[in-house]
Image: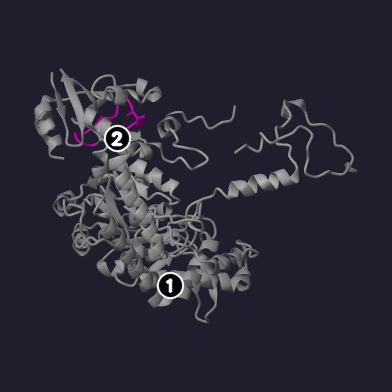
Amino acid sequence: MELIFEKSVSGRTGVRVPLSDVPKAAPLADAVRRRDPVRLPEVGELDLVRHYTNLSRRNFSVDTNFYPLGSCTMKYNTKVTENAGGLFASCHPMLALLPGGDKLVQGPLAIVYELERQLAEITGMEEVTTQPLAGAHGEMTGIMVIAAYHKARGDQKRKYVIVPDSSHGTNPASAAMAGYEIVTIPTAPYGDMDLDLFRQAMSDEVAAVMLTCPNTLGLFNPHIAEICAIAHEGGALTYYDGANLNAILGKVRPGDVGFDVIHVNLHKTFGTPHGGGGPGSGPIGVRGDLVRFLPTPRVVRRGDGSYGVEDHPEGIGRVSDFFGNFGIMARAYAYITLLGREGLIEVSEQAVLNANYMMARLKEEYELPFDQTCMHECVFSASRQLEHGVHAIDVAKYLIDRGFHPPTVYFPLNVKEAIMIEPTETESKQTMDAFIEVMLEAARMAKENPERLHQAPVTTPVGRLDETRAARMQQVCCE
Amino acid sequence: MAKFYTKEHEWVEMAGAQATVGISEHAAHELGDITYVELPKIGKSVKQFEALAAIESVKAASDIYAPVSGKVAAVNQALDEAPELVNQGAEFQGWICKLEGVTEAELGALMDAAAYDEYLKGL
């Protein structure tokens, strides 16, 4: 496909602008004037419309195709919740913070407050803040709250944060950003953080333990209550990474298990856009005695039922403008309200059922390193295909040729040639069956015609990209 | 002196009180094409098995742990421009850094080449 610049014809325009009747200002000083004329494409309106319409048709999204990207929960976002976000587009975000302005935005404030209540109820935490703008931002906010807690107690020697080796990379990164040193605990053969090694690593210098449950292998850790107890015994707090919350809605509440701080990803679990910049939203929830450290300002409900905004002195301050990505929060509020308790439980049940269906049908051909009932996602290894010289990336690229978005590959890091599939609850059996057929076809092809897989994708506008060269030669400037 | 290896796939070769450190051929192969090596700062002190440097490939980013305690005396600056040196010779021209003030006593916690080979077979 031609670039818009390649379609450019000198002198061609889409509109004819009338001559200006405004008197010319004195010319700018030479020092601040550009030396060369700005290079813009010169095309007619129709050329322009066709160019971008055709580009947009090459978009790949959940709205066009199946997108089983493990760990990302790429569920379909219904159009009715999508519309909820647009309802408040004309509402200025500063209003709530102006004197008397809260009276003009009772509805939006109610949404912030009620969404926080809903999330607190779902996760079993005392209070929630919607300020963090993404999951990793939530992690960092949570770790800052934990640091504030230890500091307020005068407990300054805690300098470590423990993470399992299967954690999302953002966990150690967030803790390191907040100034902690990272201790990584290996995964035991049973697929979860090695409990004995964890016990050995615990000391009065550990500030927090960060866990994802179900973990990145899609397995529910049966020891989480024990891990929380061991951490608390050592004076550390426990952090629940809610990346995989879609598996346990209405089944387990992290707060009931003993977690002190959690984050949830509205763009994963609660049906708001994910990918393409989202934007995301990563509210955090905390147990009772940590509420005073939450970011400020907080939306409160007053005795007369009206909503307002309050500061509190011990809070860690603002972590974002206003109250977070409000348009996203409005969508999540609509999603939770529409589905209700029974609906959310059904979401998780269907997500787990779908993942187990995938796992059961694919394990004949693909190695399943941790062969047990999975939660919302399952992790295979392409190790059998590797015997024929076919890597996980080759299978992934072939799926593109057949109209599917590849699953996550090479993550988690503790599975060789990992292929991580998360169908989510919104896919039909027919869609999953079609995907499974192509996966089985790729496995057959690995044995019979591995070269075809090495060449994939062959149906796309651009073939196999040279990822190594792209990473090594990072020249992103034009000319 | 011979090379010694960690379970995390680093190697160390001592010469007096100085040691050269890198990642094993096996690790380089597993990582695939290396795209970036985050070299440690000269003068940084590390304890044995603490994070020393980081390495990125098209597949993953991983920490490189210090096989022995010491202070960073030199880094392989060539890796800034040519991270592929690690793929071409992880245990030779693809070395990561040199540590000074090291002690042989810590080698006891590591594997020699034969033991490391045996360890790789078990993975």
Confirm or deny contact between disc 1 and disc 2 (CB under 8 A).
no
In the image, residue A326 sits, relative to residue B76, either above or below, namely: below
Q: Which mark is residue A58?
A: none
Q: Give the chain letter at badge 2.
A: B
Determine whether, in the image, residue A347 is placed left or right of residue A318.
left
Disc 1 marks a residue whose amino acid type is: Arg
Q: Is residue A29 or residue B80 the one in the foreground? A: B80
Q: Which amino acid type corresponds to the residue marked 2 in the rendered image?
A: Leu
Q: CA distance from mark 1 to mark 2?
A: 45 Å
Q: Is residue A75 above or below residue B110?
A: below
Picture quadrant where residue A436 is located? bottom left
- Name the main secondary structure of what is drawn in magenta: loop
Task: Please report the residue visible at 31 percent of the width from the left and 65 percent of the height from the top.
Answer: A352
Number of the label disc, if any, that sits on residue A117:
1
Residue A147, given in percent of the width and then of the height, sits at: 34, 53
Q: Residue furthest front?
A: A448
Instruction: Give the image's coloring scheme.
Output: one colour
Residue sitting nearer the eye, B49 or A455: A455
Query: Element type at marker 1?
Result: helix
Residue at 38 percent across and 77 percent down: it is A342
- Give the residues drawn in magenta, as a range: B31-50
- Label drawn at residue B31: 2
At numbered mark 2, what does the secondary structure look like: helix, strand or loop? helix
